[in-house]
Image (cartoon, coloured by chain):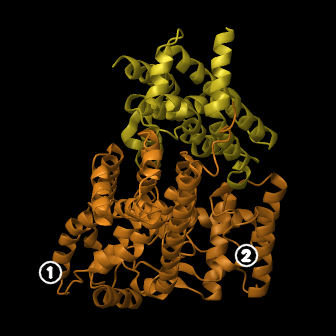
Amino acid sequence: MFGTLLIKECKQILKSMVYYIYVVVFVLFLSSQLGGDITENLQRPQPGQESYGMTNSQKESDIMGKMLAELVLETERNSYATYPMGFYKGVILNETELEKVKAIVEECTGKNWQQVTGEMTEHFNSYDQSSMEGAMQAQVTFSVFPRDDLSYAEFCEYMEEICRLVGAGSSYQKEKWSQGVSVPGTYEQAVEEFEAICTKDRITGAIARLFCDYAGIVLAILPIFLGVTRCLRDKRAQVVQVVYAHKLSTAKIIGSRYLANVCMAFLPVIITLLIMQMPYQYHARTIGVAPDLLAFLKYSCIWLLPEIMVVLAVAFFLTELTENVISIFVQVFWAIASLFSSMALKGNFGWNLIARWNALGDTTAFWQQRQELLLNRGFYFVLSLVMFVLTIVIYEKKRREGETIYGKIFKRRR
Amino acid sequence: MERYLNAGGSFIRRQYAPHILLTVLFCVMSGFFVSFRNLDASQAAKVMEMYIAFTGILLLTPLFMPEQNREIWLLERSKATPLWQLYLIRVLEAVVLLMAIVTVFLFLMRQGGSVFSVGSLWLGSFAEIFFLGSIGFFVSGITNQVILGYMVSVLYFMVNIGGSKYLGKFALFQMMKGSYDFVALMLPAAFVLLAGGIILREKW
């Protein structure tokens, strides 16, 4: 019976216009992001190259140089990026506050503000700012050196003072920068990194992460509409009481709906990844690496499936609870907050709904943070199961009592 | 006149109140996510375009919700007041609310010491928010599915984050770049979408 119901639900989804918009948007987004020849950067590094990418450093001198560089850039623009509630908030200081920040920069560098900004302009002018590569290179190599006698403890105190001025959630909080900063890598580090891509990732693993990074963005939003559509379908078709009176258990009814939605939402992911992985497998073979044929599938199941599950489970739960479209706003807000709260486009998974790894490779760094990702995805998998059970409880209660338990503010109003 | 006031009041009480409450909640929470202090024209535009723009979707998309139920639609059709007049009353209510929201947020930014041209930003913000909401209104009207209305308008917003160059004068976030030319095109387009939504829904 459950199987029949599941197939029926899948057929229902196939008749829905929302589903076709979901598929078209997903495929278009993925092909626009991964359509180019991204593997051209996957070559063995050669000595004497202009740049060897970025690497994470926890050296105190690197941290001080990079944090001061960021402070100078933000102070010059008078726009500080903060994330007080996990969502981006640009902070603008008034004249007095701005003078205090400039004084701190002067204390840290031992130079006056004009000298600091003059050196910054000189640095950026030495790169070709009209090209994307030049602008990027200028940005990543920019550091502001602290004065020789500035101790790390003093630097920490100055950063705390900046935090007080700028407000909560800025990048000057110790817990954010103490994990390290990005600095330009060396030839040896680049070779080591390339070897890791070939041995640990076998090329396809690195690209699968990029695939999951992009797919994760759209999958945090699109399944919401599938879930809400399904939950409101009975009400729209005015068959709520008929379904309530059916002999089938609530677990089977909700279970078949939820499972059908998860399967149908994951289906385009599977089809897209099967098609997209082929050129990368071929590329791996051309450079003499045996590709991991299941990399895309493994990454998608671990990275994307829990995301789809939790988005649908929350959509089911909120829609059954309120019998309204409120779930759309809650989840769109959650997804956008998660998207903008990822200060780094790579790693720092935390409890973010959208796990980002917007880099081709960085295999060593990824394997160091892999546990954090697994914990994050595991949490969302469990959360989706909890939400699913809660949905069953609510639906069962509605079935027994024949009405909503909450929502419809004016329900009993005459 | 009394008939129209009754129709408008009844819609707010029985259908629209949760949507208004949600919009108010969204606006009240803005302090946690955006700053109103010491902004220049571009930064003030960013607050309106990236955050307040959602109020257009929240207020204009659900206006056809009662008529999704065919019985209600048939009942309303049988009444003396034409349906387009009912829809127009709802649109007017939503527009008044949007105007109030835009005005309140500009006032908050001004109070926070921000510097911008009130007239241009008010008109630009209203045009953009109204246009975004009218997309949801149009889609939910012609498909008779409010969820599709939300989906298309949210996707339109998302497309603008990375692909605004493909949308020409209909791209959002133009005030952040200092351009206000879009108003002359976007405002009439919003009216066309509203009128189109009502006409296509009832005549087609």
Tell me what hue chain A is rendered in: orange
Q: Label 2 belongs to which residue? A: A109
Frontmost residue, A74 versus B79: B79
Q: Mark 1: which secondary structure?
A: helix
Residue A89, compared with residue A367, is above or below; it is: above
Going from N to C along the chain, the mark reached first, 2 or 1, is 2
Q: Amino acid at mark 2?
A: Thr
Q: Label 1 belongs to which residue? A: A286
Residue at x-position 34% and y-position 89% = A196
Residue B194 in the image: x percent, y percent?
A: 47, 23
Tell me what hue chain B is rendered in: yellow
Corner quadrant of residue A58: bottom right
Q: Amino acid at mark 1?
A: Thr
Corner quadrant of residue B119: top right
Which chain is mark 2 on?
A
Residue A132, compared with residue A352, is above or below; it is: above
Corner quadrant of residue A292: bottom left
Residue B24, compared with residue A305, is above or below; it is: above
Separation (CA) of disc 2 from disc 1: 50 Å
